[in-house]
Image (tube, rainbow, N blue to C red):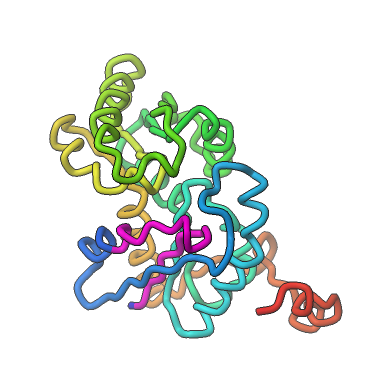
Amino acid sequence: MRIAYIDPVGPKGAYYFIKNELERFVDQGNNVDFFCLKRGPDNLEYRYYEALIIPDLIHLLLDLEGKGYDAAIIGCFFDPGLDVAKEMLTKMIVVGVAEASLIIAKTLGESISIIVGREKHIPKCIEVIKTKGIEGKITSIQSLGYKVNDMANNSVISELIEKKALEAITNDLADVIVLGCTLEVGHYEELQQKLNIPVIDPVVASLKYAEFLVEIKNTCKWFPSKKYAYERPLEEDIISQRIKELFYY
């Protein structure tokens, strides 16, 4: 099984240490490769930045599909371009880290708290939650008060995540914690042991979910439906509208 993890930012914003965590958890015999975009902002904290990267992200996904990858992960908790990717891809599984994390979390408990980087992320996080149809299970969204780029290699983040998780458990009766940013990677095991409840790492969750979806695609032939919501535009329509000339891939 070949899996691609995409950090959907330009090279200056890519966090290559995420690959080490992916390699820890990938099933034996499977392979996971790390990618970022050739150009783009160094974070997706703003809707404008997210809008800028969608064409390059989709075309990278199409390229990876053409190279025979079985699955790709979009490594941002906002799941940018996920529905577009499901519409365009015809063979390769695509996974969003938020979708994977929340689907897993809702099977493990009835009250979920999400810990995001800062207050700016909360409205977008609420939008993502609504698309997954689990508003009723979200008991709180906690903020660490840090921008994305300030979270990597920050020695206080682990303690702060623990503090916010304890607040969610005590004040909001959370029985599952979801780490709502890929740069919270690597903290879940110690925290989970201390709290004695499930703590969902979005990077690990997306990898395991991708492996699961590829397996059921191979064994049961289940793949995103192309009937209505994810109907793909015809190739001749793409050509006639000069899409390939505007956004080359």
Report x, y in % for residue 143.
42, 27
> Which one is in front, 105 or 143?
143
- The quarter of the image holding the C terminus is bottom right
Q: Would residue 59 appear left or right of 241 to someone viewing this image?
A: left
Residue 210's place in the image compared with 190, above or below, is below
Say whether residue 17 is magenta: yes
Which contiguous range is marked in magenta?
Answer: 2-19
Q: Would residue 71 appear left or right of 37 to someone viewing this image?
A: left
Which residue appears at 47% of the width and 55% of the height? 13
Residue 41's place in the image compared with 55, above or below, is above
Q: Would residue 150 appear left or right of 131 to someone viewing this image?
A: left
Residue 6's place in the image compared with 182, above or below, is below
Q: Residue furthest front?
A: 12
Report x, y in % for residue 174.
32, 25
> Which one is in front, 182 or 239?
182
Which residue appears at 47% of the width and 59% of the height? 12
Which residue appears at 60% of the width and 42% of the height? 46
Q: Which residue lies furthest to the right in this view?
A: 240
Report x, y in % for residue 159.
23, 29
Say whether residue 43 is magenta: no
